[in-house]
Image: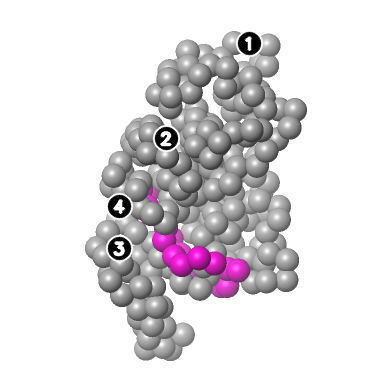
Amino acid sequence: MSRPILETKNLWVKVGENDIIQNLNFKLNPGVHILLGPNGAGKSTLLGSIMGLERFKITGEILWKGENITNLSPDKRFQKGIFLAYQLPPVVRGVRLKDVLKKILNINQKKNLPEEVYQYLKDLDLDESFLDREINQGFSGGERKKSEILQVLLAKPELALLDEPDSGVDIDALKSIGKAIQKISKECNLLIVSHNLKVLDYVKPNSVLVLIDGKYIYTDGTEIIHIIEERGYDFLRRKMYVEKLSLGN
C-alpha cells in the first residue's frame, strides 16, 4: 500500500471567528484525486490551508511525506513540491506574468524564457503578448485559469492543488485546460476541487473524496458521484455520522 504523501492530524482552520475545518483527519495517497462537497463545506479552505495561506488560522498538523509543515510559509511549501492554483486567482498589479514564470523557473529576470513556455502558450491557445500583461489584470475567467495552469505546467510540482479549474470557462477554454491537466496528471499528484466535474472528461481519478461539514472526508471510487447525484450530500452526511456513532466517536 502506498505511503500517504499528505496527512492532516486534528486539523482546525479558522477564518475570522468561524471554524471552517474542524478536527479533520485524512490521508492523501499518491495519484489523482477529486475533492467534492456541498457549498461551504470547506474545500477551498482545505486547499489554502495545505498551501499555508496567511489568512487561515491553523491548529493541528499538516504532514508532507511525514514531515510536519504546519508552520512553513507558502514559499517553503512550494520549494518542497506543493503548488496551489486558485479558484479566483488574484490580480497582482505591476507584476507581469513572465516575471512570475521566471521566478517559478528560478532563472534570472534578464534572461529569456525557455522554449517550453511558448509551447505551453500554444497548447493553451494564448498569444505570446500574454506574458507581458500584469498578473490577472483584465484577464477573462478563462485566461485566469489558463495562467494558473501554465504556472503549474512550469512548476512541475509533486502535488498540484487545483481549485475548480473547470469552472467559469467556455467550451474552447475548457478543452485546452482539460488537455493541460491531463498532461499534468501524468507528471505529478493532483487534488482537484470540482463542482461540474467536466474535468473528468480528461482525467481519471484514483479516488473521489467528499468533504462533509469540514469534519470528515469520505473516500470512494467514482461510483460515489452517481450516489451523490441521485441522493445528494445529505445521504453521505447521515451515513458518515451513523458510522462515527457506531465507532463511538
Determine the residue positioned at 53% across, 33% down: 143
Query: Which amino acid, by three-letter code, is at mark 4?
Result: Asn
> Which numbered disc covers residue 42?
none
Q: Main secondary structure of the magenta part?
A: strand
Query: Secondary structure beneath disc 1?
Result: loop
**Is the residue 150 above or below the residue 214 in the image?**
above
Residue beneath disc 3: 225
Which is more N-terminal, label 4 or label 2? 2
From the image, state whether disc 3 or disc 1 is nearer to you.
Answer: 3
Work out how far the residue at label 2 is from the one at label 1, CA to CA, in angstroms. Answer: 30 Å
For label 4, the residue is 206
Structural crowding at the residue carrying mark 2, measured as other residues with C-alpha within 10 Å and reported as few (<14), some (14–19) or many (≥20): some
For label 2, the SS is helix
In the rendered image, the vertical position of residue 157 relative to residue 45, given as above or below? above
Q: Which mark is residue 111?
A: 1
Amino acid type, callout 3: Ile
The residue mark sitting in front, 2 or 1, is 2
Seen from the viewer's position, the closer of residues 117 and 65 is: 117
Label 1 vs label 4: CA separation?
A: 40 Å
Taking depth in this image into account, of 30 and 234 the one nearest to the observer is 234
Dot 1 amino acid type: Lys
Mark before the other along the chain sequence, 1 or 4? 1
Q: Nearer the viewer, mark 2 or mark 4?
A: 2
Q: Report which residue position mark 2 lands on.
A: 173
Tell me the amino acid under the disc marked 2: Ala
Front one among 133 and 8:
133
Of tags 2 and 3, which is closer to the observer? 2
